[in-house]
Image (spheres, grey):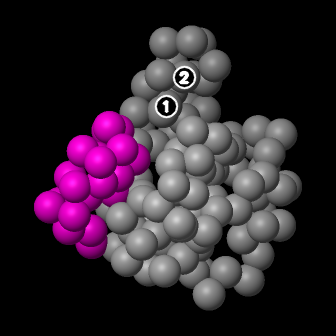
Amino acid sequence: MSVVIDASAIIAVIVNEPNKPGIIQATQGLSLVAPASIHWEIANAFSAMFKRKRVTLDEALVALDIYKQIPVRFIEVELSESLKIARQLNIYAYDAYLLRCAQKQNAPLISLDKTLLGLAKTLNLRVIEV
């Protein structure tokens, strides 16, 4: 079975946040999938961490090396369908890509973003909360 994973969950794992064990346990034995946009979301998360002085560049680069080792299968999502979701839910396209990926794969979504999980539920998508 597959699970759609978002940047918040990946970041928690690669920088050893407190939720890491729960995320690993919840995804053990599952295939991880994500839209290709996840790369840019992860980089954006690190740039936000730089501004808050939560990580150094060297720490971020080490975390990126760890990220490269995580077996994630990248799914192409249709921009038109993603935009429909973005418009329907009044959300950013990056969140809509994740929701569309979960729809397309008929897979649950794992995220630390409670708002995103709530939106997934409004679309009758399954979620994994950690």
Residue 55, placed above or below residue 30? above
Residue 73, placed above or below residue 82? below
Q: Cβ–Cβ below 8 Å for labels 2 and 1?
A: yes
Query: Which segment is the magenta one?
Result: 76-97
The answer to which image quadrant residue 99 occupies is bottom left
Number of other residues with Cα within 10 Å of mark 1, as a class: few under 14, some 14 to 19, many 20 or more: many
- Per the image, the residue denoted by label 2 is 49
Q: Is residue 14 visible?
A: no
Residue that protrudes farthest toward the top in the picture:
52
- Residue in the picture at 46% in, 43% down: 42
* Magenta region includes residue 110: no
Q: Nearer the viewer, residue 28 or 2?
A: 2
Number of other residues with Cα within 10 Å of mark 2, as a class: few under 14, some 14 to 19, many 20 or more: some
- Residue in the picture at 30% in, 54% down: 85
Amino acid carrying mark 2 in the image: Met
- Residue 70 lies left or right of residue 87; in this view the side is right
